Image: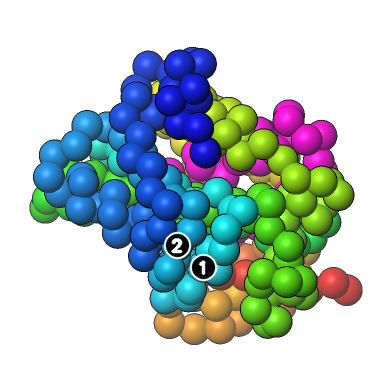
Amino acid sequence: MKVYRLQESLKTKKFGKKIIFLREINSTNDFAKELASHGIEEGAVAVAEVQRAGRGRMGRQWSSPKGGLYFSIILRPKIKVSEAVKLVFVAGLAVAKVLEEIFRLKVEVKWPNDVLVSGKKVCGILVEMNSVGDHVNYLVVGIGVNANVNVEKQFPEHLRGTATSLEKELGEKIQLEELFKRLLEKLEIFYDLFLESGLAPILEEWKKYAFFLNHHVDVISEHEKFSGLAVDVNSDGALIVRLKNGEIKRVLVGDISVKIM
Ligand code: BTN
């Protein structure tokens, strides 16, 4: 990746003004946390060609072969710990919009943090936080895009049914630098909007891609598993599910799989 050329044309105030390019690293999120703990400025980014131990949500691995885009951005918003989850929607919307704008793909989002194409995952987002008391000290927003990845050859077998790549969907390789640049620009726009106006305008747009709403979903939350109708995502970013018996559940941390009925 030609980072210097990319930085020259980057239309941002803060995001990507400092980029640390790594050929190989365990996890850009871990690297970014280290940088953040040493005081690096907001908007600094770590990007890697390959991750040896890419991490996903809920303790999962994130397969990170060559050809994908793996980066982590450091943010220092003045928000409460309880609000940190909101950044997942900021990032998810930025990715969805960029993939739609550049590649004209039909993009969907799945609560809380997945971006899908053709019903399969093309991008995952992992937001991690460091706090002081009740307030966020820094956030690391990690984004992994299956870009120029040959799903059949480069991904382990168990992912082939649920993951896709831009290369697979488009039938050709994409320009990683351009995608990275456009993502940084869009992330900054939506992050600024979030700081100014809160989550509402972001969530309103995000819901336009949220195919799972009004569908039956299986939910795995922190403490339990259940099924029901996904009725909404509320202003905190929580998923609202209506059970068969009419009971309403509110899930802030968890995962869903959408049932085809
Ligand atoms: C998920 O879907 O579970 C989240 C996946 C997040 C992957 C990205 S790749 C860049 C950053 N570094 C990591 O180790 N994980 C995130």
Magenta region includes residue 110: yes
Q: Nearer the viewer, residue 115 or 239?
A: 115
- Label located before the other in sequence (2 or 1): 2
The residue at the point 39 percent across, 27 percent down is 15
Which of the 4 quarters of the picture holds residue 20? Answer: top left
* x and y percentages locating residue 2 in the rendered image: 50, 32
Identity of the amino acid at label 1? Trp
Rounded to the nearest whole Å, what is the CA distance between mark 2 and mark 1?
9 Å
Residue 140 at what x, y percent from top left? 33, 48
Q: Is any part of residue 116 visible from this angle?
A: no
Disc 2 marks which amino acid? Answer: Gln
Q: Is residue 178 above or below residue 211?
A: above
- Specify few, some or many for label 2: CA neighbours under 10 Å numbering under 14, 14-19, or 20 or more: many
The residue beneath circle 1 is: 62
The answer to whether the residue bearing label 2 lies less than 8 angstroms from the nearest atom of ligand 1 is: yes
On the question of residue 179 being in view, the answer is yes
Contact check, label 2 and label 1, Cβ < 8 Å: yes
Mark 2: which secondary structure?
A: strand
Return the residue nearer the eye: 119 or 15.
Answer: 15
Q: Residue at point 53% right, 63% down?
A: 64
Secondary structure under tag 1 reads: loop
Residue labelled with disc 2: 51
Residue at 51 percent across and 16 percent down: it is 9
Provide the residue span drawn in magenta: 84-111
User: Which is more toward the observer, 213 or 150?
Assistant: 150
Left or right of residue 152, residue 260 in this image: right
Classified by dominant secondary structure, the portion drawn in magenta counts as helix
Ligand 1 lies under 8 Å from the Cβ of mark 1: yes
Is residue 251 rendered to the left or right of residue 212? left
